[in-house]
Amino acid sequence: MDPVSPAEFSNLVSQEPEVEATLLKVASKVDRNSYSTISEVIALSALLPVVVFLVREVGMPWLYEGKRYSELWRAKFHEWIDNQYEKEAFDPDLIEAAGAELIEKLENTNSSTTREAWERFAEKIK
């Protein structure tokens, strides 16, 4: 699997307004002190590994039975987040909180339009 660059990620996110709206809400967990466009870009880039991990390693929640999905997510995510962000400038606890919020938002997504947008987006970054 080829890595997705931050620029590609930002471009793909901007092509799917439903995905962008969800990620911008979640990105506020990464940088709680600033709401500028630059901070949003930085926060989105911090979420890039989380989103790629979710799409490639776990999958979309509506494709699985809920309990199994939650267990799979938790089992993989906590260890991965510590390894991924230990050498980054971002607080792993904030990233983990953002990832947990993202998964909660996806688990509670009932809109077929939003689900379809996420599925299109996921296919582009797999």
Image: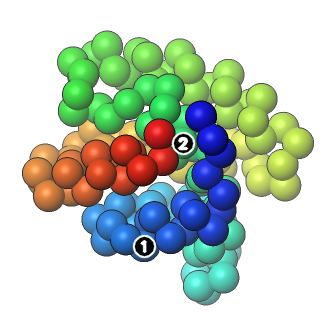
Residue 118 horizontal side relative to residue 11, left or right? left
- Whether residue 27 is visible, yes or no, is yes
Q: Secondary structure at mark 2?
A: helix
Q: Residues within 10 Å of mark 1 (few under 14, many from 20)?
A: few
Residue 61 horizontal side relative to residue 102, left or right? left
Any mark on residue 52, and which?
Answer: 2
Q: Residues within 10 Å of mark 2 (few under 14, many from 20)?
A: some
Q: Amino acid at mark 1?
A: Ser
- Residue positioned most to the bottom: 36
- Residue 46 place in picture, x, y as percent: 66, 56
Which residue appears at 73% of the width and 42% of the height? 92
Distance Cα–Cα, label 2 vs label 1: 16 Å
Q: Are marks 2 and 1 in contact (CB under 8 Å)?
A: no
Q: Specify the quadrant of the image occupied by residue 30.
A: bottom right
Any mark on residue 125, and which?
Answer: none
Q: Earlier in the sequence, mark 2 or mark 1?
A: 1
Which residue appears at 27% of the width and 38% of the height? 107
Which residue appears at 29% of the width and 32% of the height? 61
Residue 31 horizontal side relative to residue 119, left or right? right
Q: Which residue is mark 1?
A: 14
